[in-house]
Amino acid sequence: MTTRSEAMPGGASLPDPTAPLSPTGNLRRRVAISRLVDAAAMGAALIAVALLVGVAFTVLKRGISAISVDFLTSNQAEGGIANALLGTIEIVAIGALLAMPTGILTGIYLTEFAGPRSRSARALKLVLDLLQGLPTIIVGVVVFGLLVVPMQRETGFAGAVAYAIVMLPMIARASQEVLLLVPGSLREAADALGVDRWRSVLTVILPAAMGGIVTGAILAIARAAGETAPLLICNSIYNPTTVGLDPFQGVPSIPMYIFTTYDLPTETALTRAWGAALVLLTIILIANVGARVVLARSRAKMGI
């Protein structure tokens, strides 16, 4: 900004405080750059939304004709996905049961027990970051070597273990971030009352953050539910005509149903693959929306 100035003895000058402000070239340039960055960010957000809407619309358009009561309640041999849907629920549920306790306890350790300079905490965070960025096909290969080869058969349990590895870093990181949002006054009050740290974590801190932890778990489950690569390696051999719910045998699943159906040389098979994709997409969208609702309520509860 520039203003009129008054001359002073010796050639110095002071700005006139009563003069109106006028923008300088530097200010105009900064405003232009700020508007350009805002427009770029808005454009990127619109592109992301457009891509999501485009994918959802394409799946809805091509798969809606396959959706019916028979399609959802009959097995693959009868042209439906009931056994694949039940198998997916079973595999995801087992994976979640394996990943959630470990992930939540890891988040608690990083937040409540590990010091700010703990080397083990830094190493654990690095491992979680590496796991989160690890391609799921590699997870499938590792689980194949650990479980499928010794058991000499592909099983739903092996697929569930692979899913658990995919979920674990997301649940641990989400638990850590949510626990950090718990007001410090709760910890101070528990310490002032002489409560043991483990008891204050279980009875004070963890209940306050439970909504956010559940949100992170739901998002991790939704992220893993659509993965095909681990199942392609660990759980691709099964009987598609029966409801196979024994986790130590091959278990049908929607991702494998889509993979094995989309390239069959019939238009009906392709339509059914799109219908299965629509069912899976709907489940994932509902899970994500539900997680956002739970997170909003948790934030309101914690006053943040």
Image (tube, helix red, strand yellow):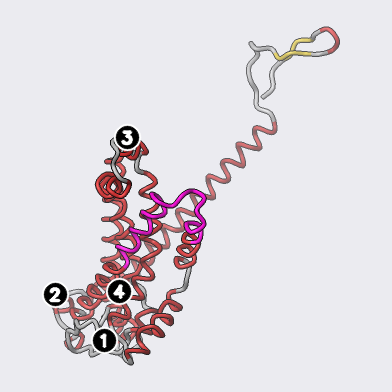
Disc 3 on helix, strand or loop?
A: helix
Q: Earlier in the sequence, mark 1 or mark 2?
A: 2
Say which quarter of the image contains residue 46. Answer: bottom left
Q: Position of residue 231 (x, y in %)?
A: 34, 81
| Residue contact at pointers 1 and 3, CB within 8 angstroms | no
Q: Are marks 3 and 4 in contact (CB under 8 Å)?
A: no
Q: Nearer the viewer, mark 3 or mark 2?
A: 3
Residue at 43% in and 52% down:
114
Seen as rendered, the residue at the extreme right is: 10
- Closer to the eye: label 1 or 2: 1
Q: Is residue 128 left or right of residue 301?
A: right
Q: Nearer the viewer, mark 3 or mark 4?
A: 3
- Magenta part of the chain: 99-123
Q: 296 or 285, which lies in front?
A: 296
Q: Residue at x 58, y 45 (%)?
A: 36
Q: Amino acid at mark 2?
A: Val
Q: Residue 250, labelled with which disc?
A: 1
Say which of marks 1 and 4 sits in front.
1
Residue that carries the numbered disc 2 in the rendered image: 69
Q: CA distance from mark 2 to mark 4?
A: 16 Å
Query: Quadrant location of the C terminus?
Result: top left
| Sequence-first tag of 1 and 3 | 3
Numbered disc 2: secondary structure: helix
Q: Which mark is residue 192?
A: 3
Mark on residue 277? 4
Q: Residue extending furthest top?
A: 9
